[in-house]
Image (tube, helix red, strand yellow):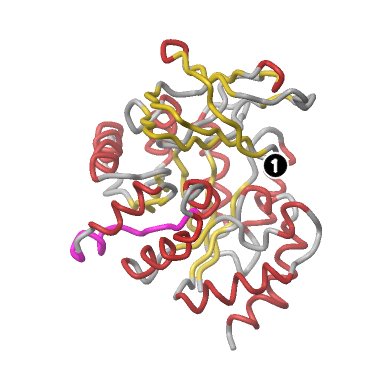
Amino acid sequence: MMLIATLPTFVSAKDLVLSERILRHPLIDGVRYNTGGASPYRAKTILEKLQALAEKHDKKFFVDLEGRQVRIAKWTPFSAGMVVLNRGFEIELPAKIHFRGLGWFDVLNADLKNNKIFFDGGFDSPRYYLGESQSVHIVAKRFNINGYLGESDYEFISGSMDVGIKSFMLSFVESLEDIYEFSQAFGAANQKGIGSSEMVIKIESLRGVEFVKKLSPALTKELWLMAARDDLFLAHLNCKRDFLDSLKTIISKDPNAILASKIMSGFETGDSLTVGDLSDMVLMSQAGYKNFMFSDELSRKFDQVMLNWENIVVPLLSK
């Protein structure tokens, strides 16, 4: 069993203190840094400090690139009924957009030139601001992001090369072209000759599942798959009953696939393990998953989470 934790977004010194506490835990095998969080520091500065901590505690360190992850580009009141996205896109209606904590809303129109989505927030719009860097999910008749890597991805790839990091997680992979685009960027930035990259391929969309289904056995051996369940479940908006089949597809292609997101989710909204959490872990273990990754939200409750993981979940899965 391998356990990967998510380090907090590096904003201040206290985040380094928490990161070190996570890294020194004996049950943590590796960590990832989610590059989508808003930090006042440049990529190289962030990676230098975190890589040093990971090496100190002899833990594997992954840089999680955004890929075609869609985020909000600027703070906007929900009542505006409009949001600016961080990437250029193409869309064909009908479509829905999901905001974390608020739910799904119908997309009314789009301004492709300015990366704007207009949505129907209803008559009683909550007094709520849609936060910069907050991820969103869009399900549409057709929705495409222009290119795979974003501007920040190139910065983090370059910063990784500067400090000798070669392990990456690639978000929302849907084709071999996505992997090739990353490989090209990695090769172009790899001036120090630190060796080939290690890639974890995150499956978070229906297209991603179809990509996995078509993978040849030879190619599958070269990739490490991840079932990123949060966005993957959202992608199944109109076919939720197929969600478990998608998870089974991923583990059938890669017996070492990582299960991520919505693990011990009772700690995301509360302070305790739930019946659903325990049932979920048993079901996923029976499906074949033995490697897991904690979400961003769990890093802030790390001590509580690990106490329950060590005393309840590990013995349960070991039966």
Which residue is located at x 34 percent, y 52 percent?
198
Q: Amino acid at mark 1?
A: Asp
The answer to whether 65 appears left or right of 81 in the picture is: left
Q: Residue furthest bottom?
A: 319
Please state the horizontal and vertical placement of residue 312, each as a whole percent of the image: 71, 77
Please, is residue 40 above or below residue 4 in the view?
above
Query: Could you say which is closer to the camera, residue 14 or residue 136?
Result: 136
Is residue 8 shown in magenta?
no
Horizontal and vertical percent position of residue 237: 51, 47
Residue reaching furthest top?
113
Against 294, residue 109 (above or below) is: above
Q: x, y (%) of residue 62?
A: 47, 50
Q: Is residue 226 magenta?
A: yes
Q: Residue at x 43, y 34 (%)?
A: 140
Name which residue lies at 67% across and 33% down.
Answer: 11
Q: Magenta stretch?
A: 217-228
Point out the image quarter for the C terminus.
Answer: bottom right
Relative placement, left or right, of 145 versus 309 is: left
Image height of 116 relative to 246, above or below: above
118 is higher (above) or lower (below) than 288:
above
Total number of numbered labels?
A: 1
Could you tell whether 139 is left or right of 196 in the image?
Answer: right
Q: Nearer the viewer, residue 73 or 116?
A: 116
- Using a 10 Å C-alpha cutoff, classify the residue at mark 1 as few (fewer than 14 neighbours), some (14 to 19) or many (20 or more): some
Name the residue at 66% across, 56% down.
22
> Mark 1 highlights which residue?
15
Q: Position of residue 279 (x, y in %)?
A: 64, 74
Q: Nearer the viewer, residue 230 or 200?
A: 230
Assign a secondary structure to mark 1.
helix
